[in-house]
Image (cartoon, grey):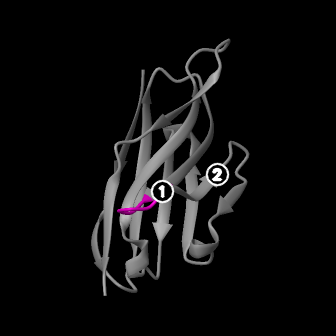
Amino acid sequence: QVQLVESGGGLVQAGGSLRLSCAAAGTIFSISDMGWYRQSPGKQRELVAAITSAGSTVYADSVKGRFTISREYAKNTVYLQMNSLAPEDTAVYYCNALVKTIRTGPYRFYWGQGTQVTVSS
């Protein structure tokens, strides 16, 4: 079993910053990609940012220049530094990881439980 535990959400004023963390724990042989998604009421879940095992990153256009994804490989942890937050960033943020639990097994996607980010105007 693999668990993704997120932390760092909360309430912040527009223009402020938050840092989200997500630690993967359990039976882990290797982790490929890790990422952050978000979902606000009435909208579909969308990719915010992702980082590969090689360190390549991708960002949604709406967060480029404001958010930074990073990874601490030894701790199986991914971070999302969010700056210049705006009310439209308000959403539940979910961590995602592509994990192999045994050497000969396939990679499977796992999700965290989500953490609420609320940006007030």
Going by the numbered disc 1, the residue's amino acid type is: Gln
Choose between 120 and 25: the one closer to the eye. 120
Whole-percent x, y for residue 30 in the image: 61, 28
Q: Nearer the observer, disc 2 or disc 1?
A: 1
Q: Is residue 29 left or right of residue 22?
A: right
Whole-percent x, y for residue 104 in the image: 68, 12
Choose between 49 and 7: the one closer to the eye. 49
- Residue at mark 2: 51
Please give the range of residues in magenta: 39-45
Q: Is residue 2 left or right of residue 104?
A: left
Residue at figure coordinates x 58%, y 42% from the top left: 73
Whole-percent x, y for residue 52 in the image: 68, 46
Q: Is residue 27 left or right of residue 98?
A: left
Whole-percent x, y for residue 18 in the image: 38, 70
User: For the N terminus, which image quadrant?
Assistant: top left
Magenta-span inclusion, residue 84: no
Instruction: Please tell me whether residue 96 is drawn above or below residue 51 in the rendered image.
Output: above
Residue at figure coordinates x 34%, y 43% from the top left: 113
Residue 95 appears in the figure: yes
Q: Quadrant of residue 56?
A: bottom right
Mark toward the start of the polypeptide (2 vs 1): 1
- Residue at mark 1: 44
Q: Residue furthest front?
A: 42
